Image (cartoon, helix red, strand yellow):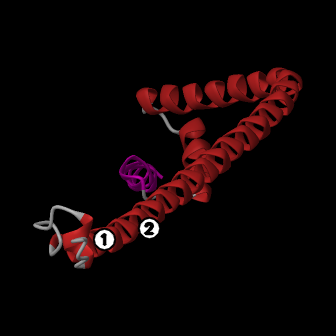
Amino acid sequence: MKDRLNRLLEKYFEGESSLDEEKEIRELLQYAEGYEIEKQFFLGLEKYTALESNAEIQLKPTRNLYSFWAKIAAGFMLFLMAGIAVFQYQEKQREEEAYGQVMQAFALIQTNMQKGLNSMDAMEDFKHLNTTEQLFELNTKK
């Protein structure tokens, strides 16, 4: 019996025991002489689980109320964050659209300015003429 108990305790403390083996350890410790530290350890575990189960029973009604409001708050936060994300996305889209329109306007201005400069090149040839008579080769001699 002691040999079996020693092997089971060794497996337990290495973390390799099953639930059935842990039950068997508890049963063997009840009838075994010695093993005071192990008995206190398992007795402490039993007391701890009993206290833990009592605490869970007492907290359940408040946990449900808390859980209910926590779920509502989480849902509200989820919708709020989604709304903010959609708003920021739409704002970015509007900025990109405005930027595209400004670039199109600049391109149109550049095109029209280039046309105007090209037409001014033709006038460059006539720059040396001073009067309209010279421009149109009019002879105003009488």
Image point (16%, 61%), residue name? 130
Q: Position of residue 34 (x, y in %)?
A: 43, 31
The reply, left or right, for residue 85 in relation to residue 4 is right
Cα separation, mark 2 vs mark 1, equals: 10 Å
The reply, left or right, for residue 132 in relation to residue 127 is right
Residue 59 showing in the rendered view: yes
- Label 2, on which residue? 108
| 37 w.r.t. 132: above or below | above
Q: Position of residue 139 (x, y in %)?
A: 23, 76
The reply, left or right, for residue 121 in relation to residue 25 is left
Quadrant of res 114: bottom left
| 67 w.r.t. 10: above or below | above
Quadrant of res 26: top right
Image point (48%, 34%), residue name? 33
Q: Nearer the viewer, residue 100 or 80?
A: 100
Q: Position of residue 84 (x, y in %)?
A: 65, 41
Query: Which region is colored magenta?
Result: 1-15
Q: Position of residue 61 (x, y in %)?
A: 89, 24
The residue under label 1 is which amino acid type? Gln
Image point (55%, 59%), residue name? 97
Residue 114 is tagged as: 1
The residue under label 2 is which amino acid type? Leu
Q: Nearer the viewer, residue 88 or 79?
A: 88
The reply, left or right, for residue 6 in relation to residue 41 is left
Inspect the magenta stretch and tell me whether residue 7 lies in it.
yes
Q: Nearer the viewer, residue 30 or 133?
A: 133
Disc 1: CA contacts within 10 A as few (<14), some (14-19) or many (>=20): few
Inspect the magenta stretch and tell me whether residue 48 lies in it.
no
